[in-house]
Amino acid sequence: MGKKNTRAPNWEMLWVILALAWPTMLEQMMQTAVQYIDTAMVGALGTQATAAVGATGTINWLVTGTLSAIGVGFLAFIARSCGAGEEENAKRAVGQAVMVVLVAGTICTVLTLGLSNQIPIWMQVPESIQTLTAQYFFVLYLPMLPRTASIIFGTVLRAAGDTKTPMKIGLLVNLINVVFNFALIYPTRTVQVFGNTLTLYGAGLGVVGAAAASAIAFTVGGIYITVVLWKHPLVSPKGQSLRPDPEILRPCMQVAIPNMLQRFATSLGFVAFATMINSLGEVAAAAHTIANTVESAFYIPGQGMETAAATLAGNAYGAGDNKKMKDLSRMMLPLEICLMIFSGTCLFTLAPTLMGLFSSSPEVIGLGVTVLRMVAVSEPFFGFYIIVEGMMMGVGKTREPFIYNIVGMWGVRILGTWICTRVLGFGLVSAWGCMILHNMLLFALFLRCYRTGKWNPLHHKAETEELAV
């Protein structure tokens, strides 16, 4: 009697993909909505306030990107262990994740706070706002330990297939952030509501108040997700050793370190990119900051699906199911491209309206609309390569993404922007053109990786077994 085929048909896999992706998408939508609110609320204080908040945004990518890379190492190991039915190994890995959070969070706290006064200088922030930028940065990074817990523990939960818990905690964090923004940014004022005069009390802390609101929200989120993880029925670290376990850490770090180097190097590229843009003046810096904020909402379909791709690819690899791996890619790539075509169309159409939400300056709005419409055209290509990259992270293949991203960032975006802005004297539009060219190069490289089967470790194993037969 032949073995019964228990593999899920494609429509069932679609529901699995969406079940994993939608909570992440909703979480990111809420984060983006709060980022929109933050930018609009700070933008009401003037162009300088907007520039001060946005000037060190790339440092945030550098720090959180490095921590996220550590999470990817645990994601690949835990997803593979769950797919293979090795729950005890998954729990041991979570115990090691707790240890890493304590060490990495402490190191990041010391570094970010110690360098808070120097970072605005290194970023070539205009002298008029360097002090304000340093104050904002210092307050924002005070709760670095709970922020580290949120990033790594959130990845651990997603690796185990639980994307709803990080989503719920993210919603709470965003709600707290908005409430404290209203209380801390503005001074006490009166408003008219249905003909009635209401007094709204506020601390009037301005930009520093925005940082304090985020710091409070991050602290609550980090504590909450730690408690939830501790009580989780599948991946609780309760009873696990917090001492270094080479048997677990070695495979996790083999995945994490290349990804960490990739994110660190690309994030340094973002810092260099932002530094060159900051030197173009306040209008270019403000337009860049706002356009980045607007654009982030339209990356949500790609980033949400990337989480599902990484988790499901890791599960399929752990189970040794090559057919499921292939079905996953054939389902996810067309779905993602369609989502990003829709997203890019919306971004192109709504660019003037969205820029107008954050600035009243015609110069800033006009410049932001131009660069947003440029990048909108490249959204489907971004969608393709981020899914392939996500699947490769899920199976622990991080060497090729490391090489591709370094070459693209430093060989195309940074070198191209330096030539355009510093040598040829062009402005923000040329810098975003280099950014788009970087994304197109990544699309071409990941397309080649996908077509040759290098993304899938089970592909070559299957070929070897066929030749042996």
Image (cartoon, rainbow, N blue to C red):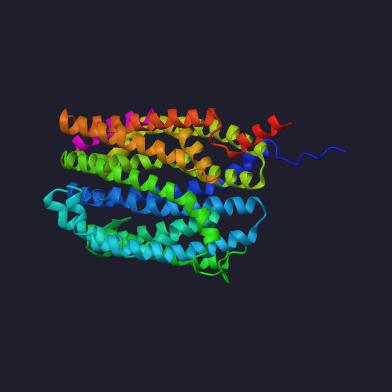
Q: Where is residue 17 in the image (x, y as percent from the top left)?
A: 59, 42
Q: In the rendered view, would you say 417 is above or below 304?
A: above
Residue 295 lies in the magenta stretch: no
Q: Where is residue 396 in the image (x, y as percent from the top left)?
A: 52, 46
The image quarter in which residue 310 lies = top right
Please tell me which residue is depicted at 32% across the width and 29% down the height of the picture: 374
Quarter of the picture containing the N terminus is top right
The rendered magenta stretch, by its main secondary structure, is classed as helix
User: Outermost residue, front direction?
Assistant: 468
Q: Where is residue 145 in the image (x, y as percent from the top left)?
A: 38, 65
Quarter of the picture containing the C terminus is top right
User: Outermost residue, bottom direction?
Assistant: 239
Please tell me which residue is depicted at 62% across the width and 44% down the height of the picture: 317
Left or right side of 191 for 393: right
Residue 373 lies in the magenta stretch: yes
Q: Where is residue 323 in the image (x, y as percent from the top left)?
A: 67, 36
Left or right side of 312 for 222: left
Q: In the rendered view, would you say 280 is above or below 117?
A: above
User: Outermost residue, left direction?
Assistant: 128
Q: How many labels does the image show?
A: 0
Q: Magenta part of the protein: which range?
A: 361-379
Residue 185 visible in image? no
Residue 175 visible in image? yes
In the image, 162 versus 78, the foreground residue is: 78
The image quarter in which residue 456 lies = top right
